[in-house]
Image: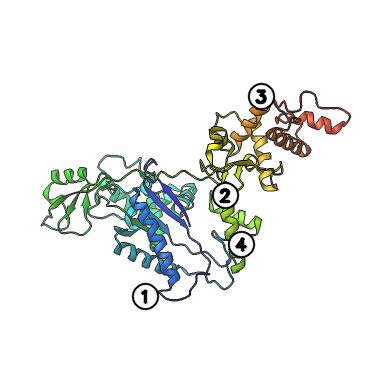
């Protein structure tokens, strides 16, 4: 399962929102029996896992979750590489039914407060809604349907004259002009047309875009009630107002108060609950180049033939995936570490520490003795290519420390700095210097750029051209 969590420090409209991006499974669940409710035990367990995750999100302060129920096509892998040939891919209606049953359980358990569709929640006007309808209100999640569709619509050059001739657009503009109170109609014209076209695209398939409210939302401003203080209607179900909207409700004319469709108005009752916490759960982030995105993970499985088409292969692939997940992170700081300089416990399996943590705490890190294991100086082909790309990038990068988006840029710059100040050098057996020189030699063999900015590249190429000459300067004087 891949999710996108936007915490309390994220900007609107993604603040405190969760997007359930991808779910994938292989049909090896045993025993193949039915639960007490009559559904398959596999479905029951998967539902409980998802409800447990939603409950966790609710408890740490997230307010909403969106799901795009989009089934994969036959032989199209979402997350896991190579599904069993006997496994059937669900159709759209079957997948929607699976999600609906999940949501019914979550509502019954009190995890989900309200269920809606993305179209009805954000794009459909109601009599009680006071907030303006805008495309900027929808959560902008990566690889979701509507952001891609909106970008396509904005790029499409439509003729303004033809737009005005459309009766639906003309009717929409008259309604918007009538409801325009601030005189900003001309500024919001593009947004109004975008919302209209998005609504047309999503209306026919709106049941596929699920919107779950994990906390109470104000019915007027459509914002989550984070403070815990709200006003609830004594007659209507799930009708809550925030403090600000309730004050505006009391100051409004009687005919405009809730409910707007009847003459008899409803009273509100004050409710005070605990305010929502910050969404930071306190756990350190485990970085891994193989698990950062669905594409990275799927490519890693394809490159290493981690298949799930048979039970035997699925077990092996699972073990190797877990190995890469835990072996690539430091057991102390949980950050991604360079395997060339890792310190490992010879007693405890999977207990690895990065070089920075060992230099800081030394033998206090672990109860057993730690040793920097003897490995090949050059990494495997995939990792070697990453370092070679980082070598070229870092030689041209002038960004401040840790500010560059290239993952290995800062690591390579530290190796440059180390090469200038190292006293042990290559001949003395310095592992970092040996590793750096191996990279430089590998790069120079394949480099065809006469003005290459990589340190010592031109010297090494000159050495290859005339092997009777030696490289000038000390062996590891890498200049940054």
Contact, CB < 8 Å: mark 2 with mark 3?
A: no
Mark 1 or 2: the one toward you = 2
Task: Tell which of 126 and 33 is nearer to you.
Answer: 33
First in sequence, mark 4 or 2: give its number: 4
Tag 3 residue: 421
Label 2, label 3: how far apart the Cα atoms are: 35 Å
Q: Is residue 253 above or below residue 91?
A: above
Tag 4 residue: 316
First in sequence, mark 3 or 4: give its number: 4
Contact, CB < 8 Å: mark 4 with mark 2?
A: no
User: Going 59% across and 64% down the picture, which residue do you hit?
Assistant: 314
Tag 2 residue: 348
Label 4, label 2: how far apart the Cα atoms are: 22 Å
Q: Position of residue 428 (x, y in %)?
A: 74, 30
The answer to whether residue 319 is left or right of residue 178 is right
Q: In terms of secondary structure, where does tag 3 sit?
A: helix
User: Going 70% across and 29% down the picture, which residue do you hit?
Assistant: 453
First in sequence, mark 2 or 3: give its number: 2
Tag 1 residue: 36
Outermost residue, right direction?
A: 468
Label 1, label 2: how far apart the Cα atoms are: 42 Å
Q: Position of residue 263 (x, y in %)?
A: 11, 57
Mark 4 or 2: the one toward you = 2
Q: In terms of secondary structure, where does tag 4 sit?
A: helix
Q: Position of residue 283 (x, y in %)?
A: 43, 45
Q: Residues within 10 Å of mark 2 (few under 14, many from 20)?
A: few
Q: In terms of secondary structure, where does tag 2 sit?
A: loop
Q: Residues within 10 Å of mark 3 (few under 14, many from 20)?
A: few
First in sequence, mark 4 or 1: give its number: 1
Q: Which mark is residue 59?
A: none
């Amino acid at each position: 399962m891949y999710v996108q969590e936007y915490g309390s420090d994220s900007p609107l409209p993604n603040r405190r929102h969760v997007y359930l991006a991808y779910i994938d499974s292989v049909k090896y669940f045993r025993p193949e029996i039915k639960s007490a409710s009559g559904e398959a035990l596999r479905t029951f367990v998967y539902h409980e896992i998802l409800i447990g995750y939603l409950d966790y999100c609710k408890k740490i302060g997230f307010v909403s979750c969106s799901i795009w129920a989009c089934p994969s096509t036959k032989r199209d892998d979402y997350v896991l590489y190579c599904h069993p040939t006997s496994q059937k891919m669900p159709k759209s209606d079957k997948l929607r039914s699976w999600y609906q049953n999940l949501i019914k359980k979550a509502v019954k358990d009190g995890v989900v407060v309200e269920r809606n569709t993305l179209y009805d929640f954000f794009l459909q006007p109601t009599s009680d809604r006071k907030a303006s309808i805008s495309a900027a209100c929808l959560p902008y999640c990566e690889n979701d349907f509507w952001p891609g569709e909106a970008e396509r619509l904005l790029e499409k050059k439509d003729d303004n004259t033809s737009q005005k001739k459309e009766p639906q657009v003309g009717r929409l503009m008259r309604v918007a002009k009538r409801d325009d109170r601030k005189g900003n109609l001309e500024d919001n014209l593009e947004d109004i047309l975008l919302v209209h076209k998005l609504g047309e695209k999503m209306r026919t398939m709106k049941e596929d875009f699920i919107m779950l409210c994990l906390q109470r939302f104000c019915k007027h401003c459509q914002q989550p009630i984070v403070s815990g203080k709200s006003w609830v209607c004594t007659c209507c179900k799930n009708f809550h107002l925030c403090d600000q909207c309730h004050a505006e409700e009391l100051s409004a004319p009687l005919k405009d108060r809730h409910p707007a469709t009847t003459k008899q108005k409803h009273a509100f009752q004050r409710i005070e609950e605990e305010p929502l916490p910050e969404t930071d759960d306190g756990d350190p982030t485990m970085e891994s180049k193989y698990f950062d995105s669905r594409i990275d993970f799927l490519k890693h499985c394809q490159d290493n033939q981690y298949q799930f088409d048979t039970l035997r292969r699925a077990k092996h692939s699972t073990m190797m995936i877990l190995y890469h997940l835990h072996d690539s992170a430091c057991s102390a700081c949980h950050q991604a570490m360079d395997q060339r300089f890792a310190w490992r416990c010879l007693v405890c399996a999977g207990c690895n520490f990065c070089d920075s943590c060992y230099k800081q705490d030394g033998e206090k890190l672990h109860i057993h003795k730690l040793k920097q294991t003897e490995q090949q100086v050059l990494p495997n082909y995939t990792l070697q290519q990453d370092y070679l790309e980082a070598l070229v990038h870092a030689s041209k990068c002038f960004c401040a420390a840790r500010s560059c988006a290239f993952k290995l840029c800062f690591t390579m710059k530290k190796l440059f700095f180390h090469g200038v100040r190292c006293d042990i050098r290559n001949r003395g057996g310095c592992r970092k210097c040996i590793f750096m020189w191996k990279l430089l030699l590998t790069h120079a063999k394949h480099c065809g750029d006469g003005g290459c900015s990589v340190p010592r590249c031109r010297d090494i190429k000159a050495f290859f051209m005339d092997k009777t000459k030696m490289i000038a300067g000390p062996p590891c004087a890498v200049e940054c």
